[in-house]
Image (tube, grey):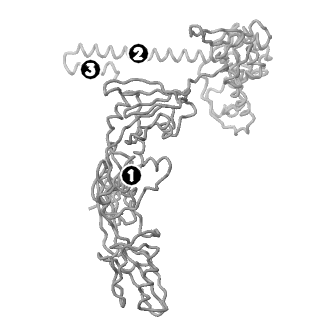
Amino acid sequence: MRPPASLVDSLRKTGQTGPDSTSRVPQSNVVTTTTTRRGIGSQPSAAGAATAAERQVTRPAIAPTPDTEFQRMVSATTGRQLPIFGASLFAGDVPSTFAPVDDIPVAPDYVIGPGDELRLQVWGQVNQEGSFVVDRTGAISVPQMGTVHVSGQRYDQLSDFLKAQFGRVYRNFNLNVNMGQLRSIQVFIVGQARRPGSYTISSLSTLLNALFASGGPMPQGSVRDIQVKRGAETIVHFDLYDLLLHGDKSKDIVLSPGDVIFSPAVGPQVALLGSVNNAAIYELKKDPASATTVSDLLELAGGRTSSAAGTQVRLERIVNHQVLSILDVDLGSTAGAVLQGGDMVSVTSIVDHFKDAVTLRGNVANPGRYVWHTGMRVSDLIPNKDSLVTRNYWQKRNELGQLPREYQPQVDSGAAGSLQVRGTTDLAATDRVTEGGAARASEGGNALGAALAGGSGIFHGITDVVLSAPDINWSYTVIERQRASDLTTTLISFNLGKVVLDGDQSQNMELLPGDIVTIFSTADLRVPTTQQTRFVRLEGEFIAAGVYSVQPGETLRQLLKRSGGLTPEAYLYASEFTRQSTKRVEQQRLNEYADQLEAQVSAETSGMIAKSVTDRDASAATASATGA
């Protein structure tokens, strides 16, 4: 029976589709570690793979820990959710292979112990080769040599030691020794660890390897005083900050069998936020002699950012476990402020205020901030007309010079409406006048006649006359200014055309620091008709059909006279006058009328159904209303 496709896809995502799946199953709650160990005295294969059985150790994945009480207090007080510094190092699942692999070089100071595998090669007077595992007594048994005690020897001294032992029996020989499978050791991880317990790890594993195996300390555990206990003695106090901040792992010692890794409770914690390079919650050392000042805390965070304001920081402190108090700390003071557990240090940023600057925006070529100087006026900010031509205008102009595409024919779908030209009709900005000829009037929709008349189709025009950018509003420009006396904002308007075009100094306003000068276009504010740029398209039987710029107050009759008039083939009664604004108004009215009709039909249907006595009457009323 074939399983459903969804089940197959689900299984493929989890790596369980067949017998060739890997030993680590990436599920949400388990991490499977496979450890391979070579048998005593066995030789490695050509591929370097082990021949012994595999042992699988399954551990639950690290569950996300909730925020600590101090994190919640910082979030409630400052509105910022801060992480604990160093916790991200142990984030995620525990890697499946935390211990060093067997093929890496062994350090010269490695000490031989029970369970290690030695690979010997002897040639000369005697030829011998084999792998020997150190037994529990610390010795290896070599044929024709007997028992040789090697436990406690350093790896860099092992070759000379074995040569001396073989030299008691043989002469004229050479000897080579290498490490094979390394022994495993057992360590204990206790205290505030994420996964405390007993761990069997490689003999080359260090303190950091064991910490990664256990998932590191919990948020309630200390990362600045991780202790390694060997017997009754604490042999090292490891500060994880030395590794995170300075890359110093000199105290990352190699573990021995029976070592205990103890993570004590976390020490005093302080919060640092604001304009610093690494805002987080930091742990202070428990040693009273190691007092940490605000400057020391900023150094742990990588210092302040370039946008930090001044030399003062704000310190919020819990007083006598009762209330919060606020202190201002001057970083320039040599004494500094000593931090206590629960302190929250905030570094403020500068205000985004530009000194001695004015802002130019709107319909200009180069909007932005400009340096203000004493006696600065509008003419200094806008020296000539070229500074008012926008970059978008030149971009559209440059696009006109690109290689054109080929013409694509399109069947004429007919005009949206027609209007007979009479009298002295005023022209609007988007008017279109089409004059039909005598042949076109007699076509009557005949495709053959249209083809013979040369009107079988129209083409997409690529030479349309359009505005590359809206025109400048010369009559109105405004200066936005905030009064320093009462911080109220006022608008000072002036005539830009008189300043730039006429050089009228009465309109050349003086500028102050912080002023914002806005240049408007005719698209921003609706200007009078006489100031608008309007185009009219004349198509068809005109002496000079084309696109014309309409003068203020010009009528259609005047425009036709200016364009040369009509051709002898013009059929005046077939003329079409199209205006986009009128089309939009008509469409809006049609939509409103359709809505009214729909509402009226619904009301009448509801009334007839309500008056019906039986179900048959109701059905008949519905059919009558819908015209069925």
Q: What whole-number distance in Å separates the C-alpha atoms at marks 2 and 3?
A: 21 Å
Which quadrant, please, contains the C terminus? top left
Point 44% across, 88% down: residue: 167
For label 3, the SS is: helix
Report if residue 421 is visible in the image. Answer: no
Label 3, on which residue? 620
**How many residues crowd around disc 2 within 10 Å: few (fewer than 14), some, or many (20 or more)?**
few
How many numbered marks, from 0 up?
Answer: 3
Q: Nearer the viewer, mark 2 or mark 3?
A: 2
Q: Nearer the viewer, mark 3 or mark 1?
A: 1
What type is the residue that disc 1 sits on? His
Foreground residue, 281 or 29? 281
Q: Is residue 365 above or below residue 233?
A: above
Q: Is residue 529 left or right of residue 34?
A: right
What type is the residue that disc 3 sits on? Ala
Label 1, on which residue? 237
Residue 602: x %, y % from top left: 34, 17
Q: Nearer the viewer, mark 2 or mark 1?
A: 1
**How many residues crowd around disc 1 within 10 Å: few (fewer than 14), some, or many (20 or more)?**
some
For label 1, the SS is: strand
Marks 2 and 3 close (CB-CB < 8 Å): no
Q: Earlier in the sequence, mark 3 or mark 1?
A: 1
Label 2, on which residue? 597
